[in-house]
Image (cartoon, rainbow, N blue to C red):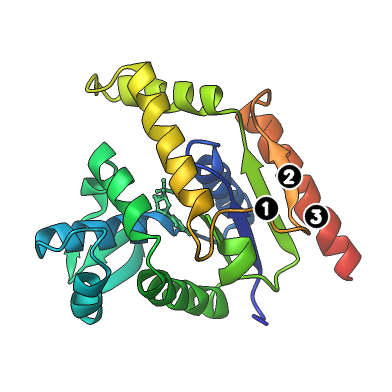
Amino acid sequence: MSEHLNIAIDGPSGAGKSTLAKAVAKELNIRYLDTGSMYRAMALYAMRRGVGVTDEAGLKTILDDADITVVYDARGQRVLLCGEDVTDRLRTPELSMGASTVSAHPCVREKLARLQREVGKNYDVVMDGRDITTNVLPETKYKFFVTASPEVRAMRRFNEMHARGDASETYEQVLAALKIRDHNDSTRSYMPLRKAEDAMLIDTSELSIDEALNTLLEAIRQKETEQK
Ligand code: DC
């Protein structure tokens, strides 16, 4: 078990995990690792190498060359793909779906989970994803499952896209894509998204960011006190 403070947050797309995880990391002055961006970088790598995200045999042949590294600078986490900073290219609808598909392959998950465990071993970190509480950091006491209704999550995604001037998809399209990803992520046979029994459930459908953040921080403090 890591000697460092490891906080694990899982949940479906758009539940507010990353906003919360970033805020918790800032509040506690520790690192934040967005593991979804690593799956996105893997999908980008497969596309660049001309390998389909469903092609397990093809993925196996390029896996060792997929050099995915996470570094931190004043802007926060940056993802390097074979040395190139690809962070700003990762949040496209194409890579959202590509990451969801590529992440179903055990060989991909094993590689990325290994890298993520290393981070947990070496640093105090808040990590968010789909299998952090169940697979990457199952031993930590600080486990959370953050969720919200599909409609609320789709509306948040849609509003985010609009705020940055992206009008490429309607709300209905965002909702439909989110439901496909939910289905992919929670029904894949290897390490699907599921709530760990001992993870605290936080439904953000009716909560503001501040309310959800306070719930999380309160639970972390409570667990810290229990530990002493
Ligand atoms: O969190 P995100 O939307 O950036 O993640 C993109 C996809 O990557 C998501 O649909 C499923 C996959 N993923 C995963 O399988 N396991 C993780 N720990 C993180 C993401």
Instruction: Tell me the CA gap for discs 3 and 1.
Output: 21 Å
Q: Is residue 96 above or below residue 85?
A: above
> From where the camera sits, is residue 65 visible?
no
Instruction: Tell me the CA gap for discs 1 and 2.
Output: 8 Å
> From where the camera sits, is residue 148 visible?
yes
Percent from the top left, x then y, of residue 178? 42, 34
Q: Is residue 31 left or right of residue 52?
A: right
Q: Of the residues shown, which amino acid type is indicated by label 1? A: Lys
Front residue of 176 and 83: 176
Look at the numbered discs 3 and 1 and tell me whether their residues touch, using CB distance below 8 Å.
no
What residue is shown with label 3? 221
Q: Is residue 207 left or right of residue 131?
A: right
What residue is shown with label 2? 201
Look at the numbered discs 1 and 2 and tell me whether their residues touch, using CB distance below 8 Å.
yes
> Residue 202 occupies which quadrant of the picture?
top right
* Crowding near the residue tagged with mark 3, few <14, some 14–19, many ≥20 C-alpha atoms within 10 Å: few
What residue is shown with label 1? 195
Percent from the top left, x then y, of residue 5? 66, 69
The secondary element bearing badge 1 is classed as loop
Front residue of 204 and 131: 131
**Which one is closest to the eye, mark 3 or mark 1?**
1
> What residue is drawn where x is 60% and y is 28%?
149
> What residue is drawn where x is 26% and y is 53%?
87
> What residue is drawn where x is 16% and y is 64%?
84
Q: Of the residues shown, which amino acid type is indicated by label 2? A: Leu
* Crowding near the residue tagged with mark 1, few <14, some 14–19, many ≥20 C-alpha atoms within 10 Å: many
Look at the numbered discs 3 and 2 and tell me whether their residues touch, using CB distance below 8 Å.
no
* Crowding near the residue tagged with mark 2, few <14, some 14–19, many ≥20 C-alpha atoms within 10 Å: some
Instruction: Tell me the CA gap for discs 3 and 2.
Output: 16 Å
Q: Earlier in the sequence, mark 1 or mark 2?
A: 1
Q: Earlier in the sequence, mark 3 or mark 1?
A: 1
